[in-house]
Amino acid sequence: MKILAIDTTSENLVIAFCDEGKIKSYVSQEGSKKHNSLLMPAIEKLLSENNCKIEDVDYFACVVGPGSFTGIRIGVSTIKALSFATGKKAVAITSFEELSYGIKEDEFYVAIDCRHNAYYFAKYKNDYTFEVDCGEIDGDELDKKDCLVIKKSRASDPQKLIAVAKEKIAQNIFENITPYYLKKSQAEREYENKNMDKTV
């Protein structure tokens, strides 16, 4: 089974390719503004290095958010296009699932910095499959939680991306790949504020 998974939601572009259990990956250090130009060439290069073509991939996977609005759109549109072009199924992975995979605690939080001392968060019980709450939270409030809190501080782990994808494939969890936003983009908020001012 061949799986191609990507994460374009943070500063690091991450591409993971799994072929019969062996995982190869690409992680960029060039910042999120380069994702659009790097993504397809990097996918083609990684597959070529492993003697594989796009049409040979059995399943695709994509991190759908939360994270960078532009990054989410790049990843989602790319995987949807590849899935459609090849007729292969695709798996949606959230940033929270990647971050929480493998953690075994009665209760824990995972959090992603969304600037201005605010975080996107998800609360879990037992493991990554049982999310009980999610949203946006103030950093000071997050720090007061009396349980394990894991803040994203690194690029996504290619091993975890593939592991989550494999579990969803095994359970036949295939969804329409759509962006997972927890709030509106800054442009949308500014537009609404301007229109609100005009109506006052």
Image (tube, rainbow, N blue to C red):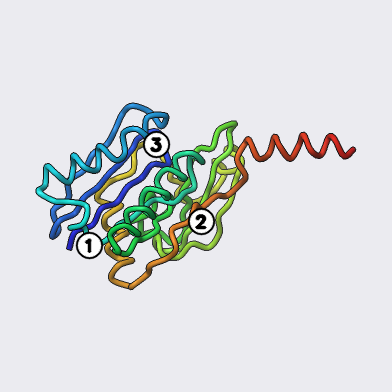
Q: Are marks 1 and 2 in contact (CB under 8 Å)?
A: no
Q: Earlier in the sequence, mark 3 or mark 2?
A: 2
Answer few, some or many: residues within 10 Å of disc 1's Cα (few below 14, many 20 plus, some between 14 and 19): some
Is residue 18 placed above or below 154 in the rendered structure? below
Which residue occupies the extreme bottom position in the image?
A: 171
Mark 3 or mark 1, which is nearer to you? 1
Could you tell me residue 72's position as x and y percent? Answer: 45, 45
Tell me the element at label 1: loop
Which amino acid, by three-letter code, is at mark 3?
A: Ser
Answer few, some or many: residues within 10 Å of disc 2's Cα (few below 14, many 20 plus, some between 14 and 19): many
Q: How many marks?
A: 3
Which amino acid, by three-letter code, is at mark 1?
A: Asp
Q: Earlier in the sequence, mark 1 or mark 2?
A: 1
Q: Nearer the viewer, residue 145 or 191?
A: 191
Q: Earlier in the sequence, mark 3 or mark 1?
A: 1
Residue at the image point whose x is 30% and y is 52% from the top:
161
Q: Name the residue beneath numbered marker 1.
A: 58
Which amino acid, by three-letter code, is at mark 2?
A: Lys
Tell me the element at label 3: loop
Is residue 113 placed above or below 83 in the rendered structure? above
Is residue 45 placed above or below 76 in the rendered structure? above
Q: Name the residue beneath numbered marker 3.
A: 153
